[in-house]
Image (cartoon, rainbow, N blue to C red):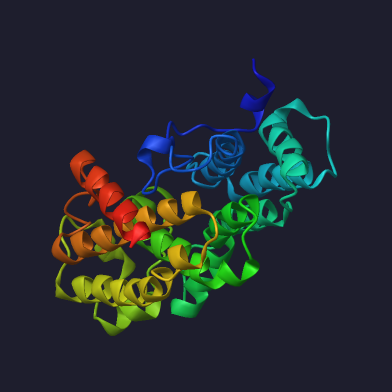
């Protein structure tokens, strides 16, 4: 048995299931292998946190092993080979491991924290779970940290969009709800309403309130491509902005409790074309 199988719990998700182009041809070819290693690390720890068969303390134990491996505290256990490969990549590229440790911290929260009290509480989670992805890419491309806020806004917007897409599945499988619980109460509904086959007026108002927050984030996120020195990364970020905008529009029109709201292949391609064109403008 592969040693990593004693720790990792692959979900079957891959780059094709993501809302954004992971390591796409828009990025420099020499950097794509490093991005692939970063994604593999993030996918592995996310799958552990989202595994409904593991107890919370076991999830935390395994995630702590990834933290120790990526930081270099542990360097020999083959069960954490995914982290070791990324640690070597970070050493080659000069990107700090703190972004990876932040991801581990976020997924430890996923293992133990099931409810959120307000938007700021949710953003605190996103700063750990989403922002590190953009910051990693900025550092990998040698960009200034002055672009962190706009990058954080884009990554956090995508994270919340993903929460809305998966809100029913997260509740049913993990009893995890990212929608702020007081918002549900104010709208006259509860977390149990996520188990319905369609959103009532109260739930719809909460979804729209959350999308209002996403649109505020996107206002800042739209400035990111113009801040970047790398044309490749500027195009990639412009495409992701277009994807986030389109998904926000779809989530306004459709009900994530009635069926998963996602881009079609044609819609994904169109966002790519639109994003690239926007980056040149």
Q: Quadrant of the N terminus?
A: top right
Decide which of 185, 103 is in the foreground and name it: 103
Q: How many marks?
A: 0
Q: Is residue 60 visible?
A: yes
In the image, residue 107 above or below residue 82: below
Check the image and report above or below for 197 versus 187.
Answer: above
Q: Position of residue 71 (x, y in %)?
A: 79, 47
Rendered residue at 42%/69% (across/down): 221
Q: Where is residue 103 drawn, in percent x and y?
A: 61, 54
In the rendered view, does 95 fall on the left or right side of 135?
right
Describe residue 88's horizontal placement relative to residue 149 as left or right: right
Q: Of 136 and 209, which appears nearest the observer?
A: 136
The residue at 48%/53% (across/down) is 231
Residue 171 in sight from this viewpoint: no
Left or right: 20, with 94 as reference point: left
What x and y, as percent, mark residue 263? Answer: 23, 48
Q: Residue at x 44, y 63 (%)?
A: 225
């Amino acid at each position: 048995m592969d040693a990593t199988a004693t720790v990792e719990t692959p979900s079957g998700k891959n780059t094709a299931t993501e809302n954004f182009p992971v390591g796409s041809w828009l990025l420099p070819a020499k950097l794509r292998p490093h991005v692939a290693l970063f994604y593999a690390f993030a996918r592995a720890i996310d799958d552990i946190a989202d595994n409904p068969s593991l107890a919370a303390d076991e999830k935390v134990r395994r995630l702590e092993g990834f933290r120790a491996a990526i930081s270099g505290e542990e360097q020999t256990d083959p069960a954490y080979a995914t982290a070791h490969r990324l640690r070597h990549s970070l050493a080659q590229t000069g990107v700090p491991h703190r972004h990876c440790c932040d991801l581990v911290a976020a997924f430890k929260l996923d293992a133990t924290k099931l409810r959120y009290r307000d938007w700021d509480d949710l953003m605190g989670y996103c700063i750990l779970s989403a922002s590190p992805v953009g910051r990693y890419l900025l550092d990998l491309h040698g960009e200034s940290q002055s672009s962190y806020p706009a990058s954080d806004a884009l990554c956090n917007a995508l994270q919340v969009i993903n929460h809305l897409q998966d809100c029913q599945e997260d509740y049913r499988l993990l009893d995890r709800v990212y929608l702020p619980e007081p918002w549900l109460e104010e709208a006259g509904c509860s977390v149990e309403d996520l188990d319905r086959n369609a959103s009532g007026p109260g739930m719809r108002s909460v979804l729209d309130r959350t999308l209002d927050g996403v649109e505020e984030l996107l206002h800042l996120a739209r400035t990111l491509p113009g801040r970047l020195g790398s044309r490749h990364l500027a195009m990639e970020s412009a495409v992701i902005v277009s994807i986030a905008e389109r998904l926000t529009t779809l989530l306004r029109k459709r009900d994530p409790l009635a069926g998963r709201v996602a881009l079609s292949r044609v819609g994904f391609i169109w966002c790519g074309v639109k994003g690239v064109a926007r980056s040149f403008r």
